[in-house]
Amino acid sequence: MKQNFINRFLSKILAKQLRKPGGILAGKVGNKMNKINSFLYDFTIDAMQLKDNESILEIGFGNGKFFDRIFSTANNLTIYGLDFSSEMVKEASANNPSTTNSGKLTLQFGSSDKIPFDDNSFDKVFCINVIYFWEQPADHLKEIYRVLKPGGTFYTAMRTKESLVQMPFAKYGFNMYTPEEWINMLETNLLHFVSSKKTENEPDAVFGKQLYKAESMCIVAKKTDDK
Ligand SMILES: C[S@@+](CC[C@H](N)C(=O)[O-])C[C@H]1O[C@@H](n2cnc3c(N)ncnc32)[C@H](O)[C@@H]1O
C-alpha cells in the first residue's frame, strides 16, 4: 500500500519532468532521456535523409546532446531548436558551444504552438517524444505547417501506444496515438502522410529497476499545395 503510494508519487514527478524538465532534477532527467532515446534519435536521423544546405528545426531537443550527430550527416546544415524548458535551452547551449557560436545552431526558448520563426523557413521539422504533451495538437501542427517551406517535411517520432502504455508515468498526462490516429491528425492539419516506420530491436527502456519493452515509430508528412 505504502509502496504503491510512493511509486505513484515518483511516476507523477517523472511525468512532469519529462513534459518540461525543470529545477534541480532537470540535469539528471536530460541525461536519462539521452540514454533511453539515443536509438530513436539515430532511427529518426536516418529517416530524415538530410541533404547538404538544408535548414532544420527540432522541437523539444532536451539537453541537445544529439545535434552533433545531425550535423555529421550532411554538409552545411543550419539547425534551429525550440524548447519550452529554460533549463534545457541553457544546458543544450552549453553542450554545443562551437556550433552555437558559429551560428550553425540556434537554440530558442518557446513553445511549438507559437513558433518564433518566419513562414516558409525550414526544409524539415522534427520532434522526438514531444507530441504526447500537446493538449491541442492542431495549434502546434498549424505552426509547423506555417514554418515549413512548400514541399517541406515533418517527422514525428514517438513511442507506440503499446509500448508507452506499460510505462507507469505515462498515465499522468501523456496523450498516446496509434499511427492511424496521428496520421488523421496530420491530414486534418494539411500535413499529408508520406510514410511510417516502426523501430525493430529497440533496446528496452529502464526506469528504476524495471525494464520496459520499447518500440517507437517515425511518421513522415509533407506540406504540399493540396488542400
Ligand atoms: C520527453 S522530453 C524529450 C527530449 C528529447 N527529444 C528526447 O527524445 O530525448 C520532451 C522535451 O520537449 C520539450 N517540450 C514539450 N512540449 C513542448 C512544446 N510545446 N514546445 C517546445 N518544447 C516542448 C520539453 O521541455 C522537453 O525538453
Image: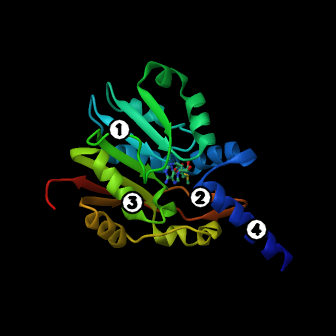
Q: Indicate the amino acid at tag 4.
A: Phe
Q: Secondary structure at mark 1?
A: strand
CA separation in Å, label 1 and label 3: 20 Å
Instruction: Quickly name the residue at label 2.
Output: 205
Q: Quadrant of the N terminus?
A: bottom right
In this rendering, which labeled residue sits more in front, label 3 or label 4?
Answer: 3
Mark 1 and mark 3 lie on one chain; the one further toward the N terminus is 1
Name the residue rendered at 72%, 46% in the picture.
Answer: 23
In this rendering, which labeled residue sits more in front, label 4 or label 2?
Answer: 4
Instruction: Quickly name the residue at label 3.
Output: 139
Q: Secondary structure at mark 2?
A: strand
Q: Indicate the amino acid at tag 2.
A: Ala
Which residue is at the front of the view, 159 or 190?
Answer: 190
CA separation in Å, label 4 and label 2: 20 Å
Report if the CB atoms under discs 1 and 3 are less than 8 Å apart: no
Query: Tag on residue 9?
Result: 4
Report if the CB atoms under discs 4 and 1 are less than 8 Å apart: no
Query: Alpha-carbon neighbours of circle 3 within 10 Å: few (<14), some, or many (≥20)?
Result: some
The image shows residue 185 at horizontal and vertical percentages of 33, 67
Would residue 182 be found to the left or right of residue 25 on screen?
A: left
CA separation in Å, label 3 and label 4: 31 Å
